[in-house]
Amino acid sequence: MDSQSLSRRGFLLAGAATALTSSATPFKGTQGVPLKVGFPCLQAPAENTMGVSWAISGLAKGVVEYSESADLSNAKIAKSGGYGLVPIDIASLNVRLENLKPATKYYYRTITTPFIDYKNIYDAKLGEPIVSEIHSFTTMGAASAAHFCVINDTHAQWKSFEMCVGKVKELKPQVLVWNGDATNTTQDKQTAVEIFLDPPIASKDYGADIPVCFESGNHDFRGSWISKKEEVMMPRHPAERRGDQWDLKWNFAYRLGDLAMIGMDTGEDKPDGHPKWFGLANFEAYRKAQAKWLEEALVRPDIAAAKFKIVFCHIPLFAAKNHPDYPHDGVKIDPNDYAYWSRECHDLWAPLMEKAGVTAAICAHKHRFRCDRPTADRKWFQFVGGGPECGKDRKGVNPQRFPTVIEGKVENGRLRIIAHDVFNQRIAFDEFIA
């Protein structure tokens, strides 16, 4: 049992179960089986809101207690869900903290109460609350520390994932951007709970004090359950977008000190008409809607005033004509091909990035680190993160295959990008790029 297994009130806090309660009817209560509660994961951070999600092993309700004081004096209580009925669940709970102050440190803990029995609303029995340890976070804002980390293409490969989140915990950034392909193909909620909230690693608490901004990769759209992933990985706060942009649930734009952090969703890696999608794909319209959103986000006074602007998205936005990736642009419908880079996203978004003076795009998808430096026609850097392979690929040994943590921070008014090769424990790239 780890050092965080016992809460300050003496209640047992265990890692969340990787399987639901053994009851054949889990929504009728835990039936006396001890409830297991996972570490909280901070999600969808903003200047005045913060999401908190955590895994559970049976029917329960949950709240978050939070305060600006380390001892939680004058604490407020936030319930899950919005108005009306508070949601309960058997696998995970989500709570959104609202009306927070920008660039402010808060302390919080989760309180989870099991339903031992739930025949109906008039005939139910609650168990003892399970109270977590106190954790903390700092909201985003122009006065926040300009320091972020990026992981990507983790694909539920736990050895490399442990390396990545271990490095993130060591670096202690203000925010972690999870740049897509967390999953492979997701057929049920419990798989998503394991991947995002209860990974089978020692550092299950990776998101308890470092907020996570998630951007979907192509694999994060695959599987019969995955369209419901917001039940586990919370989308952005609805107030961040207009009604006509309601479905842009993962796009983000906020200040982090001198940085403008901008998240885009490149979607799937094949055209909508590809036979693999069975008519389910509607990504072309999605990318166009994001272009309109991006155009507006880049001229927002807070974003336009940022000294450095960083765009995060999964599929790369560029490949040079003499690069092996260039022919694979995701435009043609070919059962044997997929997008190594997205020409469609590039043509829609890159002109806006050029006009706004974006400093860099940080991408993923190719499972191999690279840096594309600016050219006369493209004034922004493009960084591509590595994948989960540890020194090998399908053909055998390949030293160019290693998982990365890409770190960005502003030091003395300059933007420094560091690519950490967490497999070989070395620095793959380290430069001031602006």
Image (cartoon, helix red, strand yellow):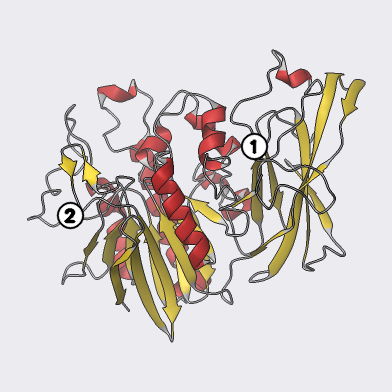
Residue 8, image x and y in percent?
81, 54
Q: Secondary structure at mark 2?
A: loop
Few, some or many residues within 10 Å of mark 2 (<14, 14–19, 20+)? some
Q: Secondary structure at mark 1?
A: loop
Residue 167, image x and y in percent?
45, 60
Q: Nearer the viewer, residue 277 or 170?
A: 170
Q: Nearer the viewer, residue 143 or 145?
A: 145
In whole angstroms, how far apart are the C-alphas of marks 1 and 2? 42 Å
Q: Earlier in the sequence, mark 1 or mark 2?
A: 1
Q: Please give left or right for residue 394 compared with residue 267 in the image.
A: left
Kindly identify which numbered label has been placed on residue 319. Answer: 2
Residue 159, image x and y in percent?
41, 44
Q: Amino acid at mark 2?
A: Ala
Q: Residue at x 59, y 60 (%)?
A: 46
Q: Amino acid at mark 1?
A: Ala
Residue at far left of view = 322
Between circles 1 and 2, the one closer to the viewer is 1
Q: Nearer the viewer, residue 15 or 176?
A: 15
Which quadrant of the figure has residue 133? bottom right
Q: Residue at x 82, y 62 (%)?
A: 72
